[in-house]
Image: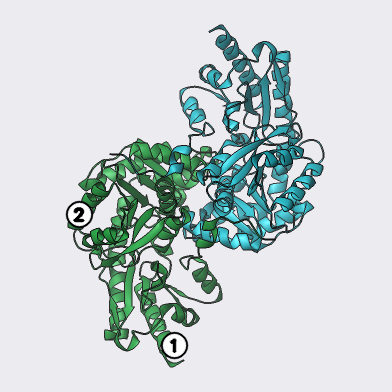
Chain colours: A green, B cyan
């Protein structure tokens, strides 16, 4: 019996960015978690969240509004204002993490065959979503300052048509950790207006800057611009398992997003929305982030030191000023290492990461890997990089 | 500035099946809730759930597997077996309620223009999802025994092509409360095989039979049949706000659904999955349902009595043997009532329901309405039907 599948079904290739690998590895032995972009357990505000859960009333068990709990939307508006972005309740839809924000973006914007530009490398599941709506996805390169916006006009000219959407992760980009400066944001806004294209701003790490100077977000530079589709989440600053994020979009799009959300999953789960609203209303977020920042900085430094000490000139890496990720590329004598082929040996040694090719639409960047420094203590990070080195030597010998 | 929207964006019309109406109404006054299909607060197993939440460890705050928490999938397999359906871990994906199960079904099965048959009347957000993937949706009538399967060959012949999927709610159908007998299920399975069409079985109410004899589900009649895409949920038997359901599908489809889920929202929220797994493992579900059934039967009886006493021959209604809904149609002197037009008067009187036209793809059945008897006590039900009668008289006078 052949199943009558949709064309898109087979295009949705499984992603290695799934916690299964790490979780399976954890069941068998003590693996250092450099793969998933997840905060470590000791950095979760568990006591405060537990209290917040306990305080939420019985309405947490009932259906909620498709746009999200009004209390949480109010708190999101306040939080955005604190970050310099003026928004309003009728621009917000609460989503199951940022991922669902991306699903809504592509659902509302992309017809089959439409052109979508993503970064190379980029967050795998972001372009997978675009592909799930049969977008024609092409990529533009990223350098140490994020998406090379200056390269876009030539790419668009070569393609012979303008994009429907440009998908960018401006702060501490996933997977590279680099940040898009204001100058490039201004140019991107100019191009988007010229092309009538939407900028999908995927910004989970913005609040986690531990060095350097903050860059204004698209919404701060161009308030109320209908071409900015902003995707945000509490996953990285509070806890990912709660699956609570939001989109901040033009009110016209917000109404359509609510319609879409009704036919996607009715509403985001209510207990976690209420707990987060309570956490925010109690002014718990800023002290929590203040506590996180020096620890993440310390972890990044520990990772870079360990990588330098262990691999020397055989590895190049980025210098993230925030977020969760270091992007490393094997060089010189190690430049032929394929990090996808290396992975089983690394997991056997007890360290998990994501291979670089997973972040490109063409399977390139095979000598690179994404290392999450947020999940492990500095000691564990050193241990993990040592294990990686052992697996590299084993792999090279084999 | 015109937004570059996808074609489907404007086709996703807002649904009145959103709790906003009820919630707004509740904020201003004491409204009797006949609209959303939600259990009442006093029938939620809150103490047990609170305990289950407290028992789940810190891993509830971390990312989970895209397929769902392994513990919950194991419990779902056990629960299915108890209901006569043999399944396995590799057939299950945990979803954000049944609604996301439907989103996955149509995402994996429907290309733009593909034919999908739904029931008339049917669950609005079900066919909205099909439309969001640009299916060509047509409907087949429902009688007191559910979908008139015998009518399908003629409908398909008239359409000139076979359907990709047939969407049915077999038990205590939403919105009519009627149940598809085994004979019709056998015929539907036969037609599905002949046409190579998938039967999307949306079955949230199955465990809530309070009268009559259970009908075997599609999976019990035809175990392991790859053409059965079963969509299930804990929303109606435990609590809707948790947003935890599951799909039970062919292992090939399950793998594709996991891929799709990664690019939809990464994973279902973890705390609620773990709490439900704990609730099931502690054998709390069956005693809870045993407590529910006589109460729901009592509520249904109260509603039918109130409708009969109040409206006499001016209203016809179905005789559900389980679930949440009574389907009522105005007759005789009231047959010209448009229940969509009546709604504001009803809400002003303090009673909420869903107009019949919301459940049809052509806006027909305007003299009908869906009444949820599950949310209110018998006393409140009588009060709600009285308020409905007042609003009908006002509306008729105006």
Residue furthest bottom in the image: A397
A396, above or below B77, in the image: below
Picture quadrant of residue B250: bottom right
A363, above or below B213, in the image: below
> Residue A385: where, in percent of width, then height?
37, 80
Q: Nearer the viewer, residue B275 or B302?
A: B302
> Residue B334: where, in percent of width, then height?
65, 13
Say which residue label 2 marks: A187
Sequence-first tag of 2 and 1:
2
Tell me whether the residue at label 2 lies in contact with that at label 1, contact meaning CB atoms closer than 8 angstroms.
no
Mark in front: 2 vs 1? 2
Q: Residues within 10 Å of mark 1 (few under 14, many from 20)?
A: some
Which residue is painted at 32% across and 89% down in the image? A333
Q: Nearer the viewer, residue B164 or A360?
A: B164
Chain where mark 1 sits: A
Say which residue label 1 marks: A395
> Residue A174: where, in percent of width, then height?
34, 63
Picture quadrant of residue B340: top right
Is A269 displayed left or right of A318 in the figure?
right
Is B149 displayed left or right of A133 in the figure?
right
Is A141 displayed left or right of A46 in the figure?
left
Picture quadrant of residue B40: top right
Q: Nearer the viewer, residue B296 or A357?
A: A357
Which residue is painted at 42% across and 82% down in the image? A387
Is label 2 on the same chain as label 1? yes
């Amino acid at each position: 019996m052949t199943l009558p599948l949709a064309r898109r079904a087979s295009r949705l290739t499984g992603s290695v960015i799934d916690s299964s690998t790490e979780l399976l590895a954890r069941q068998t032995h003590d693996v250092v978690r450099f793969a998933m972009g997840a905060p470590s357990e000791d950095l979760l505000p568990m006591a405060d969240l537990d209290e917040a859960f306990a305080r939420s009333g019985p309405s947490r068990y009932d259906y909620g509004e498709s746009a999200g709990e009004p209390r949480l939307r109010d708190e999101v508006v306040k939080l955005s204002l604190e970050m310099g972005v003026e928004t309003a309740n009728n621009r917000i839809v609460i989503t199951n993490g940022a991922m669902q924000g991306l699903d809504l973006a592509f659902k509302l914007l992309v017809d089959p065959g439409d052109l979508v530009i993503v970064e190379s490398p980029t967050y795998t599941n972001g372009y997978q979503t675009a592909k799930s709506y049969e977008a024609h996805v092409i990529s533009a390169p990223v350098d140490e300052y994020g998406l090379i916006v200056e390269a876009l006009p030539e790419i668009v000219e070569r393609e012979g048509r303008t994009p429907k959407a440009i998908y960018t992760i401006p702060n501490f980009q996933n997977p590279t950790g680099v940040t898009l400066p204001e100058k490039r944001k201004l140019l991107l806004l100019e191009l988007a207006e010229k092309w009538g294209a939407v900028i999908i701003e995927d910004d989970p790490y913005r609040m986690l800057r531990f060095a350097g100077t903050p860059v204004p977000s698209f919404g701060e530079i161009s308030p109320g611009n209908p071409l900015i589709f902003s995707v945000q989440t509490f996953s990285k600053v509070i806890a990912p398992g709660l699956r609570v994020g939001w989109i901040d979009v033009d009110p016209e799009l917000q109404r359509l997003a609510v319609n879409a959300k009704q036919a996607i999953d009715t509403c985001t789960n209510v207990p976690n929305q209420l707990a987060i609203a309570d956490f925010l209303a109690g002014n718990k977020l800023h002290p929590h982030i203040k506590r996180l920042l020096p620890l993440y900085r310390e972890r990044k430094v520990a990772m870079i030191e360990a990588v330098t000490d262990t691999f020397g000139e055989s590895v190049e890496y980025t210098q993230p000023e925030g977020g969760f990720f270091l992007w490393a590329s094997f060089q010189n004598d190690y430049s032929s290492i394929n990090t996808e082929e290396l992975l089983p040996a690394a997991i056997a040694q007890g360290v998990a990461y994501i291979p670089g090719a997973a972040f490109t639409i063409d399977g390139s960047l095979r000598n690179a890997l994404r290392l999450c420094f947020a999940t492990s203590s500095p000691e564990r990070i050193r241990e993990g990089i040592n294990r990686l080195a052992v697996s590299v030597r084993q792999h090279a010998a084999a």
